[in-house]
Image (cartoon, rainbow, N blue to C red):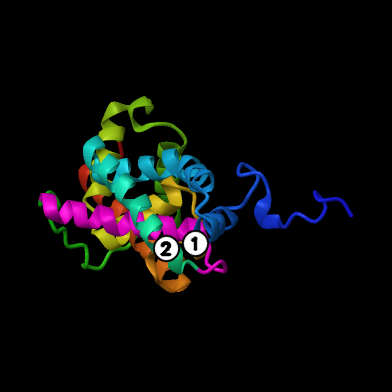
Amino acid sequence: MTQAASTPATQAPPLEATDEQLLLRYRDAGDVEAFETLVHRYEKPIYNYLLHYLHSPSLAEDAFQSTFLRVHEASRAYSGDRPVRPWLYSIATHLAIDALRKEGRRQAVSLDEQQTTDEADLGSLLNVLKSTVQTPLEQLETDERAKWTRQAVDDLPDRLRAVLLLIYFQGLKYQEVAEALHLPVGTVKSRVHKALLALNTAWRRNHPEGR
């Protein structure tokens, strides 16, 4: 048997290794290249997520750096059976919430009142959200809609905004979001539904003529 054939999976080239393999390699051998590969792999998606969440390049950059500092600090205790992606987003989300609290920039918005809508309205709103995800907000056809969507998402309570950003802006699956936020999958689905209802109600309130 050749040496190459006996090479364990965790020794695959960094670009071909899984997230978990990279972190295990860093944990066990202090492989800096493996850690740098992991950082590079998530640099754009996590930074963009934080930028959507914080709307401040400087706060997003600080939170991004802090995210991987936390990963570095916790790497020795990392268990290889824990998926890395939802863990990263869990750290990033908590740091973003902390940053907003420190900045004092969030204002509580109560959306606890009963809200009703029909499936057609929810479908239309979902299409708006999807189009927002697929193209940058600044490139949306209507600047008014882009501004409204951004503000409406910002005004959601953190518990609703987080699931919306993770699913529709970052493309995480419900199970990954549940792991990232330490919630049951059913709770994640419920919060997504409540977020869409809240946005739909806000849209109707601000666009009474159906514009």
Instruction: Look at the numbered disc 2 and give the secondary structure of its residue.
Output: helix
- Label 1 sits on residue: 176
Q: In which quarter of the image is residue 188?
A: bottom left
Left or right, 115 with reference to 31: left
Viewer-proximal residue, 82 or 131?
A: 82
* Cα distance between the residues tagged 2 and 1: 6 Å
Residue at (32% x, 63% y) in the render:
116
What type is the residue that disc 2 sits on? Ala
Left or right, 174 with reference to 2: left
Residue at (12% x, 48% y) in the render:
105
Residue range corresponding to the magenta coloring: 79-103
Give the percent coordinates (x, y) of residue 73.
Answer: 36, 60
Residue at (44% x, 37% y) in the render:
131
Q: Residues within 10 Å of mark 1 (few under 14, many from 20)?
A: many
Work out which quarter of the rendered image holds the C terminus and state it: top left
Give the percent coordinates (x, y) of residue 194.
Answer: 34, 63
Chief secondary structure of the magenta portion: helix
Q: How crowded is mark 2: few (under 14 residues within 10 Å), some or many (20 or more)?
A: many
Q: Quadrant of residue 196?
A: bottom left
Whether pointer 2 and pointer 1 mark residues with C-beta atoms closer than 8 Å, the reply is: yes
Residue at (39% x, 55% y) in the render:
72
Left or right, 161 with reference to 84: left
Q: Is residue 101 visible?
A: yes
Residue 90 colored in magenta in the image: yes
- 137 above or below 13? above
Residue 16 colored in magenta in the image: no
Instruction: Look at the numbered disc 1 and give the secondary structure of its residue.
Output: helix
Give the percent coordinates (x, y) of residue 7.
Answer: 75, 54
What type is the residue that disc 1 sits on? Glu
- Label 2 sits on residue: 180
Work out which quarter of the rendered image holds the N terminus and state it: bottom right
